[in-house]
Amino acid sequence: MGGMHGFGPIPREDNEPIFHEPWEGRVLGLMMTTAAHLKGNIDNTRSDSEMLPAKKYLSLAYYERWFVRMERVCQEKGLVDAEDLEALWAGQDIASAPEAEAVTPHDIRTMLANGRNYVRHLNTPALFSVGDIVCAKNINPKGHTRLPRYARGKTGEIIAEHGGQIFPDTNATFSGEGPERLYTVRFRASELWGPDANPADTVCVDLWEPYLEASKTS
Amino acid sequence: MPHDSHDHTDPPSDLALRVKALETALTRKGYVDPEAIDAVVDTFETKVGPRNGAAVVAKAWTDPAFKQRLLDDASAACAELGFSGQQGEQLKAVENTDAVHNMVVCTLCSCYPWPVLGLPPSWYKSHAYRSRAVIEPRAVLQEFGVDIPEDKEVRVWDSTAELRYLVLPARPDGTDDLSEDALAELVSRDSMIGTGVAQA
């Protein structure tokens, strides 16, 4: 939604708690502890959330958006069924029959502490190098992509190269990590937004090689 | 559960009840250990947060060799202080100077450097910040009480990949006598996102 108008002032809050309601923390915890059982990945999770109808996406609060997705995916993947949830909503109990091994508190602390590795070695040469002037492709896939709409068709300068990294567009659909080289591209604000932008200002965006082509003007 | 004309009942409007139901169902089936969820909540409520980032900034202000390591490889430098892990695997520190003011956003979702800043505040995840930070950063900064001279570059970093950005704010004038701990007190969360500045 970068560059859209109409969302009003930034809603700031003094002394904001980490979680406004205890259930928000439970949602974050549920997402992390069920990740292995749901066999998802970060790109698929983001993609799933983006595929909500636009009106719904905009109307849901942050943790609500993630929760609605969790609740649906847990049913789709057969971890829980609708009857069990309905019974619990009605204050009834459900039968206990463990079918899996849960992630332990120790496992989750280790996961959080270790993080994940997104970097993949590439044998292919880089198409671009620092200092090159490139153009972000004007592409509009229906599926998941990390090329922001506001940068499409715009020209900028490569200011850093970060090696091969998992490519979200394919990873999101489980069609492979398909690692591609990642670059940071610096765009002038005036290139992105026109003459009203401050000529001194810039926006830096991390973009994978398939999003880029050599600038026709360079 | 009785069914009449509907196949399934609509979910209740009470989200807390729905979340509790999902957690209970997953727990009963062995997919979730509630104590593992407690561990997640505890991590974000007590272990990670902007005080971590403030310690990094204060050390960079007082130790030029550390500052250089931070600018070269922020993940490794922050790990020296014990701050590493998920959403901090590829940290990049960007330094505010006389010529450049840096500011961080994630227009696509709400990516944020957890090990050094914790979970993002609601405003960082808001549609307003995500949409406006790239097109009118100066108007956003003014709402936060930050005025950047017209001829100074405002450089916005949109976290579209797995790199996570930490702004290294400028050290306030008149703080030469302060200890590292005292300096860390001057480093606000917003100054490390770039919507604030460190103030003495």
Image (cartoon, rainbow, N blue to C red):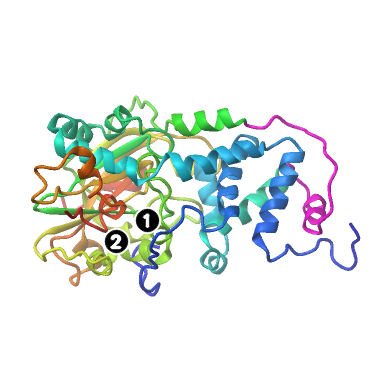
| Along the line of sight, the residue nearer the viewer: B138 or B6 | B138
Which quarter shows the C terminus of chain B? bottom left
Amino acid type, mark 1: Pro
Output the chain of dot 2.
B
| Membership of A88 in magenta stretch | yes
- Res B59 quadrant in image: top left
Residue A13 point in image, percent of width and height: 40, 64
Q: Which label sits in the foreground, 2 or 1? A: 2
Is residue A21 toward the left or the right of residue B26 in the image?
left
Task: Determine if marks 2 and 1 fall on one subunit.
Answer: no
Q: Give the x, y percent position of residue A152.
A: 33, 57
Name the residue at 17% across, 60% down. Answer: A201
Sort mark 2 into few (<14), some (14-19) or many (20+) by Cα contacts within 10 Å: many
**Left or right of residue B185: residue B118:** right
Give the magenta range.
A78-103
Which element is circle 2 on? helix
The residue under label 1 is A148
Give coordinates of residue A4: x percent, y percent.
37, 69
**Residue ID at (89%, 62%):** B3
Residue at image location 51% in from the left, 49% down from the top? A46
Picture quadrant of residue A163: top left
The magenta stretch spans residue A194:
no
User: Any mark on residue A82, and which?
Assistant: none
Specify the amino acid type for callout 2.
Answer: Val
